[in-house]
Image (tube, rainbow, N blue to C red):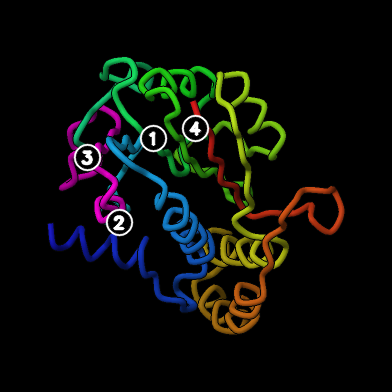
Amino acid sequence: MQNIERQIEKEFLAMPLSPKTVGFYSVRTAIFESVKEETKFFYGRVLDVGCGFMPYRKLIESNRQVEKYIGMDLEQPTYYGEVEPDLKWNGEKIPLEDESVDCAMATEFLEHYAEPEKVLSEIRRVLKPGGRFYATVPFIWNLHEIPFDEYRYTPYSLERHFVNAGYKNVKIKALGGWNRSFAQMIGLWLTFSAMHRFTRLILSYLLFPFYVLLVKTDRKPMRFDGGENSMFSSLSVTADK
């Protein structure tokens, strides 16, 4: 488990900024900052839907208002190697009673559902009245987990799905603006596009100072107006039952 903890620290909680990490640095650090901010308001029993390696478990459990953290993921017993979720599900029905958790979260999860309102309604079912749901979704990101990659949401589509699923007080935030979006695209291009490995290495070091500048000077849009505030790297959403 020490290897997993080191991997979580390096890849999710304290990723170093270097030419070798430009493919994931901008998105992972933005998500972590959002998780730190939003989970401060968690309390009671917390359900982490699609928990994966459960990288944010210790952070959430450090919140004194949280009584229990429940990491839930798909049923495959070796899906994450050494990491076993606390709870397994089939991707449709959560094996918990109605109104049995106080808060829920799902980071980089909703883009994988062809019918997002169904899973949103299922999460809402297990939330207690007044319960809080927090999620993040990508926008500037390549295809992944093929063929289970369905959507890139705008703020308006995301809000509509939540409202249609019965949530209220839906709030959408950008996790990055123009500069982080550009940096993220550069990082993805350097990491995943087809090029010779020496070309990739040289370009990674040549473009790294520009990448750092973009990340450090980014400004998140506080609203979405179709003009200056029309580009974002990813989104977070909070909503109440």
Residue 238 spot, x, y in % from top left: 53, 40
Q: Amino acid at mark 1?
A: Ala
User: How far apart are the two marked residues, 4 and 1, measured between alpha carbons?
Assistant: 17 Å
Report the quarter where the N terminus lies. bottom left
Q: Is residue 180 left or right of residue 87?
A: right
Mark 4 vs 1, N-terminal side: 1
The residue under label 2 is: 59
Q: Nearer the viewer, mark 2 or mark 4?
A: 2
Placement of 154 over or under 24, stated as above or below: above
Image mark for residue 88: none
Q: Quadrant of residue 52?
A: top left
How much space separates mark 3 and mark 1, taking CA atoms? 12 Å
Disc sitting over residue 112 in the figure:
4
| Magenta region, residue range | 59-84
Q: What residue does disc 1 label?
A: 104
Element type where label 4 sits in the image: helix
Q: How far separated are the C-alphas under marks 4 and 3?
A: 26 Å
The secondary element bearing badge 3 is classed as strand
Q: Relative to the observer, which residue lies in front, 171 or 231?
A: 171
Classify mark 4: residues with Cα within 10 Å, few (<14), some (14-19) or many (20+). Answer: some
* CB atoms of marks 2 and 4 within 8 Å: no
* Residue 208, image x, y percentages: 58, 80
Name which of mark 3 and mark 1 comes first in the sequence: 3
Q: Nearer the viewer, mark 4 or mark 1?
A: 1
| Horizontal and vertical percent position of residue 135 | 49, 41
